Structure formats: structure tokens, C-alpha cells
Image (cartoon, coloured by chain):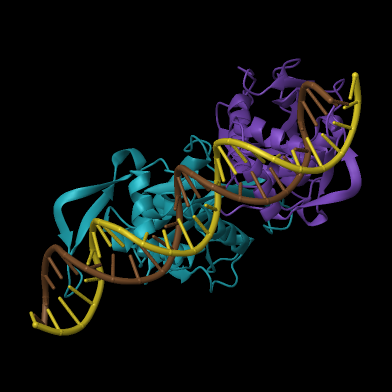
Chain colours: A purple, B cyan, C yellow, D brown
Amino acid sequence: MDPVICTVDVVLLTLQDDALKVALLKREREPYQGVAALPGGYIHVEKDADTHDSAMRMLRDKAGLVPPYLEQLASFSGPARDPRGWSISIAYYALVPASLISQERVLLADVDSTLQLPFDHKNILDAAVQRLRSKSQYSSLPCHLAGETFTLPQLQKVYEVLMGEPLNKVSFRRKMDEMDMLEAIEGQMMAAGAHRPAQVYRLKAAFRKRLQLLERGL
Amino acid sequence: MDPVICTVDVVLLTLQDDALKVALLKREREPYQGVAALPGGYIHVEKDADTHDSAMRMLRDKAGLVPPYLEQLASFSGPARDPRGWSISIAYYALVPASLISQERVLLADVDSTLQLPFDHKNILDAAVQRLRSKSQYSSLPCHLAGETFTLPQLQKVYEVLMGEPLNKVSFRRKMDEMDMLEAIEGQMMAAGAHRPAQVYRLKAAFRKRLQLLERGL
DNA sequence: CCAATAGTGTCTATTAGACAGTATCTA
DNA sequence: TAGATACTGTCTAATAGACACTATTGG
């Protein structure tokens, strides 16, 4: 049985200024000490019940947060991706509202203008963004970027940023209704300027961890 | 850096008698020697350029075939899934036409009536079947189960078995046309009884390895 | 010619999008 | 009350499914 270096890396994604951002940390150790990279580290068999646990631990220890959504992305492997030798990284992606991120601890970089990262982290980032954008077409996934509570116009904007195109308001609301995953918070409205305030919603409890899928997309 | 047992397992799927089957092999070594399980084994850092390579090697060595389609499924990890210790399995799934499978080398089991398997192979199998059935809704994936050449009625039957429901013939043909991934083999017809023979098609070369996705599903 | 399935034309039903109207806030 | 955005009703366009008809084979 050959020795293989086993790590977990997390693509921590959030929305800031209507753009999708990834959280990067300066590496504390060699290789690439001091270089901004995805949060990650070795699997710790004493602490971690599985790699999902490892990812949660890294987010807690390195970014100081508990993500509302965390999903396995894929594994990346080979002899060249890590200078220490033949390695595997089990990659996860996490979605968090910007409010959870401490900008003193992490650097937020625009996902589309992040041109290079150490190891094969650019590939991992691209895969995560592609997965998120693809799933945004037909699922409740983007809700986890919108925070605990939000209005329908805010949520539509989140979907639009992820999908990269404007959406029809009537169709969007019909789909949200069809998904039946939101509940209005009675009497709570959010004002955003000199106009009618919007109803505030939250995800129903059943959909906080589980995704809702649409038959035909948005 | 803790030692982690790193393996690759492959869910080899095919269609036989209008049912989805998984290829199992009797394990040659402990643990679970002699028990039918998914083909798998240790990563070999000298031989394998990455885990995709490991999966190809296992299919070649253990099942004696080169799959037309092989994709990473997910990783499964933890202290309890393998009696030898904390382990990770990078799981892949392969789609092959039944004609490629040598039934002397492998056992074909119905995916829905396979009730238990060693390790967490039942979980891995279930995840693969779910992924295949889900992707069948809106992609060209099922074509890889249909063989090199096939007629439209045959291909529709493949989709129907995977999706578990009959499909509208007119809509199905509209979608196949829209995907623009098939080419008719001029003059080649396939007779299947006392009735009009059907036109034979094959996947266009560009779609042999890459998937074609539908905007709105079948 | 009959039975059976391949393949197609077309009508109907369902779903998505455009547009415009009413509602409700601040300045 | 003017202007802005929230929300909704309804018409139109696009898409999917039902149905029926023609085509072509073996027996």
C-alpha cells in the first residue's frame, strides 16, 4: 500500500457587492508559505469522523465560522499537484452569507479575476464555481448565500448574479412559489428606499440542509 | 500527517434484459475474501497518474475492459467503513454496453435487489445509481449504455429503463434532434421482427467523451 | 393483405415570458 | 403628489404531450 498525502480543501464562497467571491487565506507553512490559497489541511484521523468533518473543522479553525451549507465537490489527485509528493485533496464547497465572514481573517477575491493560486487550487475553484452556477439553474442552492432572511427582490438578485443574466420577475416568483420552500415572516417588511417595502422571507426549516430541486429549471 | 488508507472503487453499470445491473467481483483477499464486491483496490503511485487512471487500471485488470464512459462519483471516508482503519475510497462509475462484459469474469446483479455489499459499497452503489438516473433526465449519458450503434426505439427504451417511466415518442425524438449529438448511418437499418426496420444511429465523435446537456430535460 | 412497429404531421395542453396595472413607501 | 420599487393579473409565445396518420417490413 503506497503512502498518499491526504488533504481536504474548502472553496468558501459568498456574495459581496453583487459579485461571487472566494475566501482565501495566507498559508502559514511551507509549501507556498505566505501565499493566498484555499483553506485546507491534512485529514486528522483522531479528530475527524469523515472528510466532511475535516472540512467543517478547517472552516471553524481557519475562517472562524460554521457554514449553512457544505457539500463535497470532487477529489483531485496526482503526483504533481503538491510538491511533497503523490497526493489527494478531497475538495468541498461552502456557501455562506457575507455577514458570517470576518474580513480580518480571510481575503475575499472575485472568483472570475482570480487568475492563479498555488497547487491546483485554481482548478478546484473553477470546478466549485461551475458546480454552483450549474445547480443554481434548478435548485434552492443560492438561498444559502442570501442570509437567514431576505426579500424576493434580494433573492432574485442573488440568482441573477449566479446565473449571469436577468430573470423574469413573474416567472421567478412562480418558481419560488412552486418550490414551496420559503415562508413569509408575517408583518416583517424591509424598506430599501423611497418606495414600497418588500415582504421578508426565510427558508422553511426542512430546506436548511436539504436542497429543493425544480423539474424544469428557472 | 496521519496515515490514511487510500483506495479506488468502481461502480460498473450496464443494461441487461431491460434492467440496470452492476458488475461485482469475488474479493481475492481479506478482508471479505470471497465476497462479491465492487471492483477496487489500492492507489498505486508508481503506475497511476491520478485516481481516474487507477479506476481505468482496475477495470482493465479485474473486468478486462476499457469503458466508453468513466466519471468520478464522490469520495467516501471514515474510520469504520474498512476494518483495516481510517480510509478513503474515491469512487467512480463506469457505463458500458453489456456486450463488453465477460460474464465469466464478473457477476451482474440487479441494482435494485442488491441488498447488501461489504464495506460501504451499498452506499456507493446507491449514490452511483442515483447520479446516473438524475443525469439521465437531461443529458446524453444513457447513450453510453446503448452500445456503438443503436436505433431510436432502442435508445428510447434505455432512457425509459433509467428514468423508470414511459416517454412520449414525439417529444423524445424532438429532444434527440435538439441535442444534435446523433448521426444516422446512411442506408443501415435494423430489423426487429415483422415490421418496418429502424434507422441505425451512432453518437457523433464529439460526444463520445463529453456529455451533451439539455436546457429543460426530457 | 394483415399485424406490427418506425417515423411524422398536427392539434391541444402546459409552461414561460411580456406587459401593464395597482399598491405602498419616502421625499 | 411625484417617483420609485413591490407585487399581481392577464395576454402571448414557446414547449411538451396526445393522437392519428403514413411507411415498411415479415408472415
Left or right of B179: which side holds C8? left
Q: Residue D14: x percent and y percent?
A: 45, 44
The residue drawn where x is 87% and y is 20% is: A104
Q: Residue A71: x percent and y percent?
A: 70, 44
Q: Residue B33: x percent and y percent?
A: 56, 66
The residue drawn where x is 54% and y is 69% is: B35
Left or right of A9: which side holds B98? left
Relative vertical location of residue B4 with respect to residue A109 in this rendering, above or below: below
The residue drawn where x is 16% and y is 75% is: B194
Left or right of B83: which side holds B27? left
Q: Which residue ends up furthest to the top in the rendered image?
A: A34
Q: Nearer the viewer, residue A218 or A35?
A: A218
Q: Nearer the viewer, residue B120 or B2?
A: B120
Relative vertical location of residue C20 with respect to residue D9 in this rendering, above or below: above
Whether residue A216 is visible: no
Q: Residue B110: x percent and y percent?
A: 48, 71
Whether residue A60 is visible: yes
Quadrant of the frame with the C terminus of chain B: bottom left
Quadrant assignment, res D16: bottom left
Quadrant of the frame with the N terminus of chain B: top right
The residue drawn where x is 41% and y is 40% is: B210
